[in-house]
Amino acid sequence: MITQLAYLGIASPRSEEWRDYSTRLLGAVIAEDGPDGAVRVKVDDKGYRIAIHPSENDEFRYAGWACHNETELREYVAHLRAQGLDVHEGTEEELKERQVAELYWTQDPWGNRHEFVWGQYAHPNSFFPGRPMRGRFVTGDLGLGHIVMIVPNLEEADAFYAEKLGFKLSDRVKSDIFNLRFYHCNGRHHSLAVAEIPGMTGINHLMLEVESFDDLGTAVDLFAEDADREILLSLGRHTNDLMTSIYVQTPSSMQIEYGHGGIHVDDLTWVAGTHDLPSIWGHHRSQAYLDGPPGIFRMLDVPEDGR
Ligand SMILES: [Fe+2]
């Protein structure tokens, strides 16, 4: 089974702007560039966790999901293939670029690439925050954080992500406006969520969690004062994972949720629930949120029945 979100890759014409953004505002640091000039962002002792490849357009490129070891990875890939998924083996170049020991990949029904790996390179005691921080990012066994994918149809997404990839349902948020499912693959309440927007696919946001409430507070101040990057959703607390967070602009269309204090789930006791609101309080939408894109997305051909 996959046990954590290991890394994320996007592409953007403004990849260079991530250097200053990641360090000064997020508190991350910049690792060595990728072979194509990708800006690589480090948030812990892993070689890097986020890659922003230079490109003409904003694109979701890949999400990397880790297994504990080669035996579990190969069993997982065999399980995926037995269900009819077309799973490809990574090339030597891909292994080197992703800094992993072994890699396989497949695509979701809308062409979004998911990679399955083990042996992500790490360098103990190599992470020091890019700006003053009281604590560190919450990663380790819980992985990089979580991603929220945009999908055109939630039931088809569930058939792929839960039934085939094996993500476990944490809960749902469903109302006239929202329709999302949240999934876990470790103790973090969710490492993956899917949000239904008909006719579209892509990535809405990446969540990074910090250990200290003060480090979230510092981010609120830094983004409030920053001339270029706006707070999209004000400080608020989610109903389901109880994360206190802000959502902020990045140099690309993908948003970042910068949070603290998310709950953990235990499969022995966890009961999946459903919520009719995403937040208990806060998360008020700014004008920039209302005017901006819902993330990095592609429009899909919509069949005549409108689904
Ligand atoms: Fe989130």
Image (cartoon, rainbow, N blue to C red):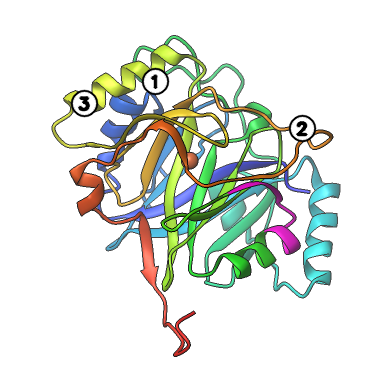
**Residue 186's spot in the image, x, y percent?**
71, 37
Mark 1 or 2: in front is: 2
Crowdedness near tag 3: few (<14), some (14–19) or many (≥20) residues, C-alpha within 10 Å: some
Q: Is residue 219 above or below residue 5?
A: above
Q: Which residue is drawn at 44% across and 58% down?
A: 176
Seen from the viewer's position, the closer of residues 139 and 55 is 139
Q: In this view, does 31 lie above or below 56?
A: above
Assign a secondary structure to mark 3. helix
- N-terminal-most mark, 1 or 2: 1
Per the rendering, the mark at residue 268 is: none
Kindly identify the amino acid type of the residue bearing the numbered disc 1. Answer: Leu
Which residue matches tag 2? 266
Q: Which residue is drawn at 45% across and 17% down?
A: 128
Whether ligand 1 has any atom under 8 Å from the Cβ at mark 3 is answered as no
Residue 170 in magenta stretch: yes
Cα–Cα span, label 1 and label 2: 26 Å
Kindly identify the amino acid type of the residue bearing the numbered disc 3. Answer: Ala
Cα–Cα span, label 2 and label 3: 36 Å
**Residue 48's spot in the image, x, y percent?**
51, 36
Q: Which region shows up in magenta?
A: 162-172
Kindly identify the amino acid type of the residue bearing the numbered disc 2. Answer: Asp
Residue at the top extreme of this rendering: 134
Q: Is residue 69 above or below residue 104?
A: above
Per the rendering, the mark at residue 216 is: 1
Q: Is residue 249 above or below residue 213?
A: below
Which residue matches tag 3? 224
Seen from the viewer's position, the closer of residues 203 and 92 is 203
